[in-house]
Amino acid sequence: MNKANINKLKLFLMGLENRFEENKAIFKHITINYAAGLKDFKGIANFKDDKLNYNFNGITKVLTISELFNEMIKQAENYDSISLTYSERGEVILITADNKNVTMKTVDVEDEETPSTPNTSSKKGLNFHGNTSTILNRDYYIKVGKADSLLKEIGIMSKEGKIKNDKIRKYNQIDHYVELLEGILDDLPKNTTINILDCGCGKSYLSFVLNYYLTEVKKRKCHFIGLDYSEGVIESS
């Protein structure tokens, strides 16, 4: 890559570094693809213990975000083009750079796993097609497909991507909970972190749901504190 576009790439990465420092809580990973002729080389960085574990060409290094981007800039001199995918919850930033130009775009992403094909006769569970429930014919706030990881984590969805029969009522409850808060959330001040105290949190299902909705749907920064005096809850947390 030529020096002019490498310098332009540096500016993009400076902004991304600031974003990382502000949004570490929702960061997922960084993937970097280097291209030279017909050959592609891939590096991936995962966040652990406040550092990035960066694997490239079979070698893993523990780096800060600044060190990772500095290494990327050095590598850029040896390749024809670079593409970087910066992934966080609900959103992905794509940066592509070559000798002609450097571009950046942001895209909203759905859950990587897609729901199974609908099968209303299945005994294992019911599958909701798209965004509308086949039972209540309502447009859900916590949507199957987009929220699969959340629904599986809290035990409402099976590994096959179906809402469990005995969890349909729970699914409706958490969605109505978000519906009740929707108007209030829109009235909260913008560009500030939303702090939520969940008293008597239990297993924190509702906090997990609201955290997902605020972070991945509303694109708002949020911080949750759960309080409970139950010894069983504390031991299992």
Image (tube, rainbow, N blue to C red):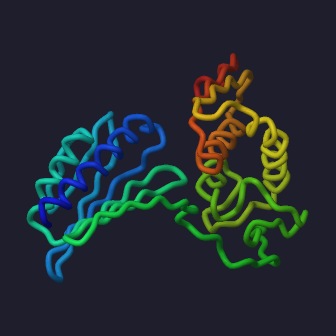
Residue 96 in picture, x, y percent from top left = 31, 65
Farthest top residue in view: 229
Residue 180 in picture, x, y percent from top left = 85, 41
The residue that appears at 63% across and 61% down in the rendered structure is 146
Position of 116 relative to 59 (above/below): below
Q: Quadrant of the C terminus?
A: top right
Nearer to the camera, 77 or 133: 77
The residue that appears at 82% across and 78% down in the rendered structure is 121
Residue 189 in picture, x, y percent from top left = 67, 30
Position of 214 relative to 155 (above/below): above
The answer to which quarter of the image holds residue 15 is: top left
Position of 196 relative to 7 (above/below): above
Farthest left residue in view: 78
The residue that appears at 45% across and 38% down in the rendered structure is 23
Q: Quadrant of the N terminus?
A: bottom left
Is residue 217 toward the left or the right of residue 167 in the image?
left
Position of 233 relative to 229 (above/below): below
Nearer to the camera, 203 or 80: 80
The answer to which quarter of the image holds residue 76 is: bottom left
The residue that appears at 24% across and 60% down in the rendered structure is 43
Is residue 67 toward the left or the right of residue 150 in the image?
left
Nearer to the camera, 198 or 168: 198
Residue 204 in picture, x, y percent from top left = 68, 34
Farthest front residue in view: 4
The answer to which quarter of the image holds residue 124 is: bottom right
How many marks are shown on the rendered structure?
Answer: 0
Is residue 215 toward the left or the right of residue 144 in the image?
left
Farthest bottom residue in view: 38
